Image (spheres, rainbow, N blue to C red):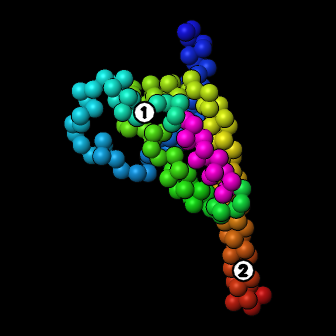
Amino acid sequence: MTMINLFKQVAVLMPCAALLLLSVSGCSSDVESSTESPSDSLSIEEINATRGDACECISASLEKVDAFSVRLNAGEYTTSSDLNSALILEIEGCMTPIGNKEADAAWLVSMSGCESFLPLREAMMMVSQAAALLKQTEETEMLKQREDEFDTSKILNRLSDGK
């Protein structure tokens, strides 16, 4: 495999890796709390073998994300926070990083070779876009609310000054 092909695979994996890392960043992990874990003595292949088959993981995750997208499109998630919390619950399991950088990276590379990987990536990108739109809407509403509060404050100040 040439370096360019490897780079292309890694570039394709970055959005999924970012979502996976995001799902773990807010949660505590037993791996993090223990100073020594049994995975320290296992090889990367042995660690990833405990996760099961990468392609089965991708297929199962695609089904979950597709069902999640249906609920998303139905308007079930009204805030980006709700959406992110629900997504974390949906993708936990075989796609959740275990905290071993080398094993997690190798797992991502093995998943990238699966037939369902590109459809999963596209589905995750759609969810990411929906989350960005929700976040943008929330920010716009918050700015409008602050402007309204500022306008109200100006009116009250004028009234109290007798102008």
Q: In the figure, is residue 35 to the left or right of 10? A: left
> Measured along the vertical axis of the image, is residue 7 above or below residue 30?
above
Residue 47: quarter of image: top left
Tag 2, which secondary structure? helix
User: Which mark sits nearer the N-terminus, 1 or 2?
Assistant: 1
Q: Residue furthest left?
A: 36
Magenta-tinted stretch: 58-72
Residue that appears at 73% across and 74% down: 148
Pointer 1 and pointer 2: residues touching (CB < 8 Å)?
no
- Closer to the observer: label 1 or label 2? 1
Q: Amino acid at mark 2?
A: Thr
x, y percent for residue 101: 39, 30
Quadrant where the N terminus sits is top right
Q: Is residue 67 magenta?
A: yes
Residue drawn at point x = 68 percent, y = 75 percent: 149
The answer to whether residue 136 of the structure is visible from this angle is: no
Looking at the picture, tell me which residue is in the foreground, 151 or 59: 59
In the drawing, what numbered circle is on residue 152?
2
Residue 130 seen anywhere in this rendered image of the structure: yes
Q: Is residue 60 left or right of residue 119?
A: left
Q: Residue furthest top?
A: 2
In the image, residue 91 above or below residue 119: below
Q: Identify the main secondary structure in magenta.
A: helix
Task: List x then y, in percent, for residue 132.
Answer: 67, 50
Q: What separation in Å lies between label 1 and label 2 (alpha carbons)?
A: 59 Å
Q: Is residue 29 above or below residue 116?
A: below
Front residue (pair 28, 75): 75
Q: Secondary structure at mark 1?
A: loop
Q: Residue at x 31, y 43 (%)?
A: 32
* Disc on res. 52: 1
Please report the residue visible at 61 percent of the width from the left and 20 percent of the height from the top.
Answer: 8
